[in-house]
Amino acid sequence: MGYGDVQMIDENGNRVDGRKAGDIRPIEIELGVVPVADGSASMRWGTNYVIASVYGPMEAHPRKIQRQERAVLDVRYNMAPFSTTDRFRPGFNRRSREISKVTSDALESVVLLELYPRSKIRVEIEVICAEAGTRCVGLTAASLALADAGIPMTDMVVSVASGKINGIVVCDLNKEEDNYGAADLPMGVLPNTGELVFLQMDGDLSPSEFQEAWDYNMEAALKIHVIMKEAIANKYGGGQ
Amino acid sequence: MAQPLVPELLRAHLAELASRDQRADGRGRWEGRELSLEVGVLDRAEGSARVRMGDTIVFCGVKFQIQTPYPDRPNEGGIMTSAELRPGAGRHIEPGPPSPESIEMSRVVDRGIRESGCIDTKDLCIIPGEKVWQVIIDCFAISDDGNLFDAFGLAAIAALHNATLPGERFDIGEDRKFPVNKTPIMCSYQKVGGRFVYDSNREEEVGGDERIHITLGEGDHVHSLQKGLKGVFTASEFVEIMEAAKVRCAELRKLVDSM
């Protein structure tokens, strides 16, 4: 079966899981889930379950990786072997390397690396259960773990994707929708400024569909940011 | 990476505590850390468990695949165990290919399960000589504060008891409960400050010596043993920890069987 062969949205605009086009899946955040890490966060987003942990700032070794004027970020995205329907063969592959790199590029744009010259900050993203949009969950969870570690950032990163199914643009595709989706637009948004630090896209979107997907992402990012701030306030107190 | 001075101070501290029959975190010699066990926690795995022992947290997921049986055992399925020590689980864990430590862990967990006979590999036959199930037990560390061996062992047997054979997904009949008819339990002991203690934490691992892993099944049958790390031990020391293991394994077996 190809694109559009399966009806994923009914005549009332309800999606397979009952959401409307612009709705996101339920999100639950917990901070400090890895007791031995300097900072950590877990995100349950739909049936996605991702744990991010942060170590550092610590001495960067070997010395050749040190930067005199700033810290280096060492970001790894990894999928657990039991995170997918068919067992995922452990080890780094090209997909996880690329996601690690773009995640690192996004986080480097917000972390105040110049505060920690010659040091290293390790960010480890573990996908425990994958549904759809794990790179977005990973990036968002990583920014929460960095906040939990007390590492200064200019802003949080909220990442979310919109896509197209049955010719209709919808926000935050779930697994069934992703299998038949005709486009995917993941973005990483800085909620306080509306700037972007992460952007990918594949598929086929008309200019108006593209605009619609973009707007859904921006709107969803603000909603998710509220949930993130609540989680941080729950642990550390303070205002929103 | 090794910092010889600090472990020497730590060793001296642990030895001093041991001489007064104490441990760094106030536990008794055969006392485990606070333990929690949950099953069915992973949506994509056919069986799963999460174990927390103090600040050590692990997941185990059981997955099934179809494979061709070995020619000399045409009607028997396969068992495979892996243990991943991801760098996210501790600052002492380096990224890279599986370390000798993680391979040792997976093999010790594997032996306890395999040799206990809790899985009858003939139950895994679909078409003799052609198609059999392969059970894959993936152990995954989230937070390593010591004694991953026992956490993996407990999570693995609990996840197996929780597992469902996904017949429908592979077009071979209905889903059915995966038959696991025994509950082998591993208990690990490490020599810290000159005497063996149960369930060493990370501090005790760093400042300790050799470990002994014992897997016991029903009726205290021994299914696997492993001595790890540098150090010597006597027959009477072994008898002592074997007696402690019999008590602890029975407690943990009751916990797993009650899930």
Image: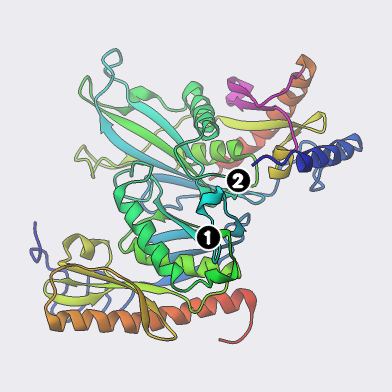
Please name which of the two marks, 1 or 2, marks the residue nearer to the observer. Answer: 1
**Residue B57 screen position, x and y as percent:** 58, 49
Q: Quadrant of the N terminus of chain A?
A: bottom left
Q: Quadrant of the C terminus of chain A?
A: bottom right
Q: Which residues are magenta?
A: B207-233
- For label 2, count other residues whose C-alpha is less than 10 Å away and answer few (under 14), some (14-19) or many (20+): few
- Chain for numbered disc 1: A
Contact, mark 1 vs mark 2 (Cβ under 8 Å): no
Q: What is the residue that sits farthest to the front in this orientation?
A: A68
Q: Residue at x 20, y 59 (%)?
A: A179
**Is residue B229 part of the magenta span, yes or no?**
yes
**Residue B107 screen position, x and y as percent:** 50, 27
Kind of residue indicated by mark 2: His
Residue that badge 1 annotates: A67
Secondary structure of the residue carrying numbered label 1: loop
Residue that badge 2 annotates: B92
- Vertical placement of residue A13 versus A134, above or below: below
Residue B224, disc: none
Kind of residue indicated by mark 1: Arg
Q: Residue at x 52, y 48 (%)?
A: B87
Q: What is the residue that sits farthest to the right in this orientation?
A: B20
Q: Nearer the viewer, residue A20 or A98?
A: A98
Judged left or right of residue A109, residue A97 is: left
Q: Residue at x 60, y 42 (%)?
A: B255
Q: Real-space Cα distance between discs 1 and 2? A: 22 Å
Judged left or right of residue A211, residue A39 is: right
- Chain for numbered disc 2: B
Q: Nearer the viewer, residue B256 or A153?
A: A153
